[in-house]
Image (tube, grey):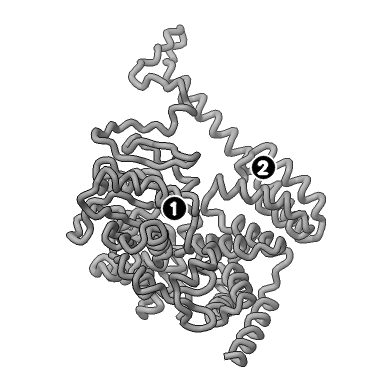
Amino acid sequence: MKRAIFDKQLLQPFQELITEGCGFDFGSERTKALENALHKRMQQQNITDLPAYLQKVRQQADELTALIELLTVNETYFMREPNHLHLLAEKLIPELLARNPLRKLQIMCAGCSTGEEAYSMAMLLQEHFGKEAGRLFGITGVDIDSSVLAAASDGVYCKHSFRALDADLLQRYFEAENDYEYRINPEIKKQVKFLKANLLHPFNNGDIGLMDLILYRNVSIYFAEVVQKRIFTNLADQLHDGGILMVGATETLHHDFGILSLKERDSLFFFEKPLTRIYVDRRNLQRNPQQPDLHKKEPQNTSKTGVTGAETKVKAVADRQKTAAAKTVDLRLLFDRALELARSGNSEKAVTLLDEITRIDSSFTKADLLKAVLLLDSADYEKARLICNRLCQQEPFCREAYLILGIIGRQDGNDELAYKRFREALYIDPQCWLAHFYIAEILYNDRQLQHAARNYRNTVEILGNKQLAEPEHCFFPLSFDARQFMEICKHKLSLIKELA
């Protein structure tokens, strides 16, 4: 089916439905991911008209769920952020047990994906409490994606999921299915249950009661701030008094809404539910110690001209907007010139122009990205890495920055980090053929041939669709030949077929 071209106005009802349904935020990069998901789902349903598909999504809850599932990339592995897990198992959970000796402690993994975190918790508890762990603890993994829940319930994992797991734990708690996959031990598996739940909605499922501990780690990247607060509130409401909620290491400050008390132990942070909750959003207090009095009236300008203070401010804002607009036009012209120089092989002059652009406007992302590509081409990996790390902090959905970091990771021989970066690029854009290709290469080298073949086929399929492939990497015009990548994929697929 020919790929449809979607007008932004036509996409808005889908964005509203998805945001209302599960809270996903839509920046420019996520809009592209939505377009790709719509195209794929409409093709599967043999629907060519976007309004007709919108009607189907509105009428059928299952269809909205299927569309949402296409927008997620589920990246997880065993013993992720192990310092948090060991703090829980060695100190915080024993304290919870001491305060609640008469009942089984309940633990939830919110946004559990394919189950690695939930099973990691079960293994650690087994290590610390032995056979009593099954009696003392109940573990529940929840996720909105039914496909990952099915994989979690199956409990079979490829080697890449074990990249942070000690070899003795792998031997003790898994059984080899074949040369590339392992199945979780039945004793561990029966300690964990998996349920479908939407974190955006209050928990009213009879199977999910109050929790003593909730792990909500590395999930909130999907959500806008207002949605983060709503989900955090729902999770806090699901805790027993004195319960603990732990987010990812880099997410703590973004969740200090004042809903739960922020605690620190062994230089690690977590949230605890007090007996009385006081809602004070503390995240900006230190950054802006002198908050303006929003109720204080501005003095009126009583000059003879009759112009009020408010009118003066409006005029000043308008003048600044005009100046900014003129500057933006000039910078775009400079950027077009820099891109032209880069394509003609004059990298040195291009970088000089790009430096000038970012000096004037440090938020000009395209200039930083093009400079990073030029640095990548000249093998100046450290400078390219610094630029891209900063971009990932400023713009979490900057696909090209993650791609460059992935390529640098491969150059450094760090396939684990490279794999993570390419998966993050796929989260932003599931049709990112470079990410599919490099993931296939990593998996092929790791002898995970079936998974590698799937990513090689995805690359071929995307490159075979001219409308998908052509606009794919506007910041990689200098060194990537799509035809060459297509041939490499086909060759690798033939090799995998011979080895099968």
Of the numbered discs in the image, which one, if any, rests on residue 269? none
Q: Residue furthest left?
A: 206
Q: Amino acid at mark 1?
A: Leu
Q: Position of residue 334 (x, y in %)?
A: 71, 46
In terms of secondary structure, where does tag 1 sit? helix
Residue located 50% across and 53% down the image: 81
Relative to 255, is 84 above or below? Answer: below
Horizontal relation, residue 29 to residue 478: left or right: left
Residue located 55% across and 65% down the image: 163
Q: Position of residue 67 (x, y in %)?
A: 36, 68
Q: Amino acid at mark 2?
A: Asp
Give the position of the N terminus as an image quadrant. bottom left
Q: Position of residue 25 (x, y in %)?
A: 41, 52
Residue located 77% across and 54% down the image: 380
Horizontal relation, residue 58 to residue 464: left or right: left
Which quadrant of the figure has residue 58? bottom left
Mark 1, other Cα within 10 Å: few <14 / some 14–19 / many ≥20: some
Q: Residue furthest bottom?
A: 498
Give the position of the C terminus as an image quadrant. bottom right
Mark 2, other Cα within 10 Å: few <14 / some 14–19 / many ≥20: few
Q: Position of residue 167 (x, y in %)?
A: 54, 68
From the image, state whether disc 1 or disc 2 is nearer to you.
1
CA distance separating discs 1 and 2: 51 Å
| Residue 10, visible in the rendered structure | no
In terms of secondary structure, where does tag 2 sit? helix
Query: Which residue bears the numbered disc 2?
Result: 330
Q: Earlier in the sequence, mark 1 or mark 2?
A: 1
Query: Which residue bears the numbered disc 1?
Result: 85
Q: Nearer the viewer, residue 90 or 210?
A: 90
